[in-house]
């Protein structure tokens, strides 16, 4: 069988596997207890406020509807001394996710309002919302395929690696994706920003640059840590200004400035309405006594890095040694590809170098903040799901220089490994 026919068959099979894993992820999501993840009630309450045409204030109690369905339908972290009153619910009775940016909640508000209008039972209602947000996750995962097609056009990397990376991401972290939370839109919006950046780099069309700017700004409006995507945005424009005359045209001021204008407007509104630019002061006061820094750099790094590739839903405990392997590979590929791009070896090495720098910056920033700014869970930087793409590119550095037969063999082996994992996953859900 020639290489092109083998690749066609492999792509078809890998797409089939992606569909199977999505179905399995839906089954996993439907079966997990509602309100079991601690923050799901607070995230849902934010959605419910938007459904009613209101924005939750920073120190509000949960809505009447959230309170009613919690007591009547769901199990939750009942505090000691709970007597059935809202006042005795403790932190669970507060809308403590109200500081979060609005985009995720505004997208789920219309289906939530419709489900309430149709008098769908609360357990079914929340389950449907969970599945809707899982569609966001799946769309973000599938975006890896066109992302790698763009990398193929730019640098000659085999586009089939996008299918493999999508499968790797589809298998990991479903334990985080299943419950309501704004992390689950982050994967889609961050990968969209990366995709539009790559297309605008290759094509140079004004419309693509506008889309790149819009998605980079929107990422911050989903979750603050997604603001790290602005580094990619700035790097893109630095490369454009260095290498292309048309990048100096005045009209390009808009796509470059767009994400910063969006974020500035959002922060200004917060300051005017709440006198709190990021709206986090109330939340920090709620959790100041419990959100302590993780003691010890090694322990912190294990929690941040190893949990980013969690396979606990498959009954697989990721070993701590993964942390050292990840750190070694990120640093090695960053240094090697940085040198190769410096001596003009090619665009692909530059892309991996940028990915490695991003991964290193996120890891270093989170570690330093954990040490020197206690009271906040900086390990949650792992929830910056655009980071997953940089992690994977920087760790695995797809070996474009390997022989065709070796490359094809690697793809077949990985497809077989993913097949075994899919079977194991399916048997666990039977």
Image (tube, rainbow, N blue to C red):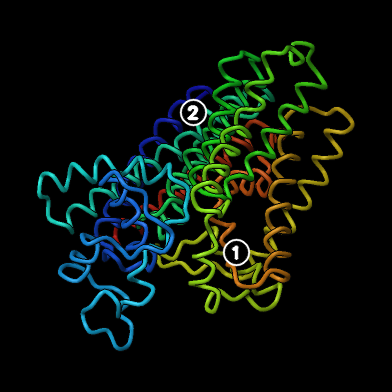
Residue 413, percent from left and from top: 52, 46
Q: Is mark 1 on a helix, strand or loop?
A: helix
Instruction: Give the residue at mark 1.
Output: 379
Q: Which residue appears farthest toward the right when viewing the image?
A: 343
Q: Quadrant of the C terminus?
A: bottom left
Q: What element carries label 2?
A: helix
Residue 249, percent from left and from top: 73, 12
Q: Which residue appears farthest toward the bottom when viewing the image?
A: 81
- Residue 376, picture quadrant: bottom right
Question: Which one is earlier in the sequence, the residue at label 1 or at label 2?
Answer: 2
Residue 175 horizontal side relative to residue 121, left or right: right
Residue 10, percent from left and from top: 45, 33
Q: Which of 119 and 419 is in front in this view?
A: 119
Q: Nearer the viewer, residue 15 or 405?
A: 15
For the residues labelled 1 and 2, the Cα–Cα distance comes to 42 Å
Which disc, if any, is residue 355? none
Residue that appears at 79% across and 51% down: 332
In this rendering, which labeled residue sits more in front, label 1 or label 2? 1
Q: Which residue appears farthest toward the left when viewing the image?
A: 119
Which disc, if any, is residue 6? 2
Residue that appears at 10% across and 49% down: 119
**As drawn, 49 above or below 411:** below
* Residue neighbourhood size for the residue with mark 1, other residues' Cα within 10 Å, grouped as few (<14), some (14–19), many (≥20): many
* Residue neighbourhood size for the residue with mark 2, other residues' Cα within 10 Å, grouped as few (<14), some (14–19), many (≥20): few
Q: Which of 350 and 252 is in front in this view?
A: 252
């Amino acid at each position: 069988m020639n290489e092109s026919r083998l690749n066609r068959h492999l792509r078809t099979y890998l797409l089939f596997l992606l569909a199977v894993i999505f179905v399995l992820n839906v089954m996993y999501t439907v079966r997990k207890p509602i309100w079991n993840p601690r923050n799901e009630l607070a995230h849902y309450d934010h959605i419910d406020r938007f459904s009613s045409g209101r924005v939750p204030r920073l120190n509000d109690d949960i809505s009447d509807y959230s309170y009613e369905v919690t007591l009547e339908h769901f199990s939750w972290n009942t505090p000691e001394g709970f007597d059935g009153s809202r006042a005795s619910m403790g932190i669970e009775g507060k809308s403590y996710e109200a500081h979060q940016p609005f985009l995720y909640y505004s997208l789920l508000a219309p289906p939530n309002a419709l489900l309430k209008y149709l008098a769908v039972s609360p357990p079914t209602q929340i389950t449907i919302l969970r599945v809707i947000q899982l569609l966001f996750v799946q769309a973000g995962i599938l975006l890896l395929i066109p992302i790698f097609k763009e990398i193929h056009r730019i640098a000659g990397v085999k586009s089939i690696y996008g299918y493999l990376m999508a499968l790797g991401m589809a298998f990991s972290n479903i334990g985080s994706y299943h419950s309501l939370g704004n992390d689950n839109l982050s994967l889609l919006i961050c990968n969209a920003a990366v995709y539009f950046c790559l297309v605008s780099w290759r094509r140079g069309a004004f419309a693509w640059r506008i889309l790149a700017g819009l998605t980079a700004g929107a990422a911050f409006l989903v979750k603050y840590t997604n603001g790290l995507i602005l580094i990619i945005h700035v790097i893109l424009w630095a490369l454009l200004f260095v290498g292309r005359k048309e990048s100096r045209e005045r009209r390009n001021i808009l796509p470059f400035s767009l994400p910063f204008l969006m974020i500035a407007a959002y922060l200004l509104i917060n300051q005017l309405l709440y006198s709190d630019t990021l709206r986090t002061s109330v939340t920090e006061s709620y959790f100041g006594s419990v959100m302590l820094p993780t003691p010890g750099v090694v322990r912190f790094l294990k929690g941040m890095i190893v949990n980013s590739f969690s396979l606990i839903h498959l009954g697989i405990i990721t070993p701590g040694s993964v942390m050292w392997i990840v750190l070694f590979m990120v640093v090695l590929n960053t240094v090697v590809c940085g040198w190769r791009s410096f001596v003009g070896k090619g665009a692909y090495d530059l892309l991996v170098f940028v990915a490695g720098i991003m991964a290193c910056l996120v890891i270093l920033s989170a570690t330093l903040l954990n040490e020197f700014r206690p009271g906040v869970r900086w390990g949650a930087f792992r929830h910056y799901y655009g980071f997953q793409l940089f992690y994977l590119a920087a760790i695995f550095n797809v070996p474009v220089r390997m022989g065709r037969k070796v490359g094809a063999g690697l793809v077949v082996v990985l497809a077989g490994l993913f097949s075994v994992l899919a079977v194991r996953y399916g048997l666990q859900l039977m």
